[in-house]
Amino acid sequence: MIIKRIIFFLALIATTACSIQAAVVAIAKDSLIERKVESIISKMTLDEKIGQMTELAIDVLGDVVNGEFKLNDAKLRKAIAEFKVGSFLNAPGPVAQSKEKWQEIIGQIQAMSMKEIGIPCIYGLDQNHGTTYTLGGTLFPQNINIGASFNSELAYESARVTAYETRASDCPWTYSPTVDMARDPRWSRVWENYGEDCLVNSIMGGSAIRGFQGNDPNHIPADRIATSVKHYLGYSMARTGKDRTPAYISISDLREKCFAPFKECVEAGALTVMVNSGSINGVPVHANYELLTQWLKTDLGWDGMLITDWADINNLYTREHIAANKKEAIQIAINAGIDMAMEPYDLNFCSLLKELVQENKVPMSRIDDAVRRVLRLKFRLGLFERPNTQSAKYPLFGSSKHAELALHVAEESEILLKNKDNILPLTQGKKLLVTGPNANSMRCLNGGWSYTWQGDLADRFAGKYNTIYKALCNKFGSGNVCLEQGVTYKPEGKYTEENEPEIEKAVNAARNVDIIIACIGENSYCETPGNLSDLAISANQSKLVKALAATGKPVILILNGGRPRIINDIESLANGIINILLPGNYGGDALANILAGDANPSAKMPYTYPRNQAELTTYDYRVSEEMDKMEGAYDYDAVISVQWPFGYGLSYTNFEYTNFQVNNTLFTANDELQFSVNVTNHGTRAGKEVVMLFSRDLVASLTPEGRRLRAFKKVELQPGETKTVTLSIKGSDLAFVGADGKWILEQGDFRIQSGNQTLNITCNKTHKWNTPNK
Ligand code: BGC
């Protein structure tokens, strides 16, 4: 799709400065908790305080004996009794454990912590799309799918269930949700987020926080857990597209887009935040006082706990070279505002920080502030009264009720992108070839953070669930479905490695069927091992699809991967395309339901799918990023072509938008704007539609974006039904952050769009904020 050119003339904007707002207070403190924190802190030694600021990996506490992890008493004593370490993380290996094993591990750690320190330990796990590290729990689709569902209830519900099952594992804390915006398709962590847009990440992130923690962040119930929103901030926008490399971000984008989801999550009650491992404009975020202390803690009035990412204090000297040695790195990070170091292996963090305090290089007030935040968190979680939970008290762990939810989320998150001549849904009785490297793999359906960090053992641990092939056999009858993959991934080694292709075998099998279901994409990966140097789909996979299409049989492409891989050479060969992203353990079943027409697709693209390697963009690009040829001697132009835009997705029914209205066409910052639009289902099936509201500032002092999503709502419509959908925003929602880093709403016209409907509204008074946040 070619994004249309639009040229606007700049006009002089008169600005009138006004508005003062107090700092946002994220969570009101509980005075009883505060008194208890003060009472404990007044009795603590410096060693005990530093211990509370330290987090170690579980591997330092034990050994693997006959394939099973066992805590080692001497190692436990060293970390807890001697160094007073107050937090541990990760699964041993890291490989998922049974909930009973977690009870045993965390139970022993708690027993020693209570006995030796009198303060409970806080254990943390990356339960990033369900119970990543608890065997037998529920794995949901990854966050990118939840973004694609555009249904915030699903973000809430999947977080609620994850919290419940994590508590059943005796673990009170997860490093979720992830709200880095997926703005660069090259990045290996695109799929951990809710897509490229800041509003979608804000709404989904905030809903997930409430699902994980419940409604009262001061008193987390026994079936909820604390969150760690990550990775604060700007992590996804590295110049090279590679994980943990520097980003260069304008002050405007940083404040307006990158910060927004974190602000929303903090306001929803997020108890902890994890910091971005990279640097922004040359300053490693772990060393950035302004971002960590000023923006997050002071400006938002946030009293939560800030944790580093994995080994990131060490990285300040080993990778970033802003410190000469570890001691200097600790000094910089703690003074910048870090409260807890995910060390994760070495106890010398404790001795070096102690020296820094004794040398007055880290003030005691900073230590006390950090420890207060750690203790407050432990009280809020009720860990002092209830250091452990008992798995027997969680009867719904891994239940069919949770499975139904996971299936439902998967169905609402798989995106129908092409349906030539309504080839889908498929009629029963057709013979199907299921082919491609993603056709028969639980690993591919789940992606990273699934039983292991890289997701590489999912086929072993998730063997009871249905791959795409198995799900299609169940749905269409195994006599009608044959499997010949043609291309397969190597089970060991790099995620990019493929076995010698057997394309001819697949082509031969195709001759005996009616329809080819070609499942292509990526194998699982996570973080730095998932870096890539070529965004195109692998050459083998592209050859496979071309050879299959040459048989003349219709091809349905199933795209299954963590990020959009370029497929412009094969897209036109497909009659139908479904992007299932990473839909989890029930993703194959969900796809079978969609292919059979038992579920009607309703998901939309959470990111812009690029068509070409050198045309990478996001939907909210500034208007001059695309222009037609200029008149005169110099024919400058810029044209961007994308495969599928953000927000795109088809249904088996069709929706019409009419009667778009607004309560007031003139507005100021404080006004509420209420938009309404009638949406009618003109098809013969019930369906869900994501109604989106986009704005465009027609003339602004900073080159405006072509479109910005301002609100969305998913509604269900029966055949023939019309609903009036109302979407409300505040006038101030149309403000932007100017080149000076300040929020401003400028007088002038805005075009608002929903579906194919547009209308114009006018701001009649410029408003500039003198506070950092609106
Ligand atoms: C990742 C985080 C994760 C942490 C703890 C890091 O490598 O960047 O997302 O929460 O490890 O496992």
Image (spheres, helix red, strand yellow):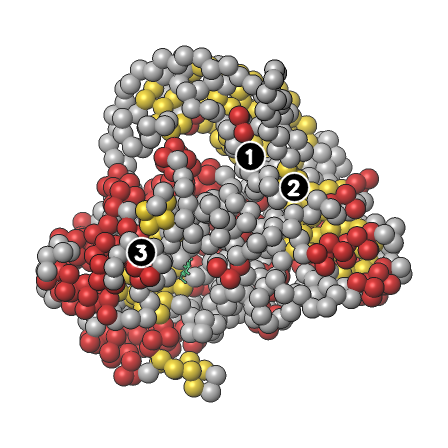
The quarter of the picture where residue 688 lies is top right
What residue lies at 36% left-to-right and 16% top-to-bottom?
A: 766
Residue wearing tag 2: 611
| Amino acid type, residue under disc 2 in the picture | Arg
Residue bearing mark 1? 619
* Disc 3 packing (10 Å; few <14; some 14–19; many ≥20): few
- Amino acid marked by disc 1: Tyr
Query: Disc 3 to disc 1, how far (Cα)?
Result: 36 Å
Residues packed near mark 2 inside 10 Å, few (<14), some (14 to 19) or many (20 plus): many
Q: Secondary structure at mark 3?
A: loop
- How far across and down, in percent of the image, does residue 90 sit? 40, 68
Left or right, 351 with reference to 75: left
Direction from residue 82 to residue 722 in the image, left or right: right
Q: How many marks?
A: 3
Q: Nearer the viewer, mark 1 or mark 2?
A: 2
Q: Can you give x and y, in whole percent of width and height, for residue 59 in the image?
A: 37, 75
123 versus 293 height, above or below: below
Q: Residue furthest right?
A: 512
The amino acid type, in three-letter code, at marker 3 is His
Residue 218 in sight here = no
Q: Secondary structure at mark 2?
A: loop
N-terminal label among 2 and 3 = 3
User: Which residue is under mark 3?
Assistant: 321
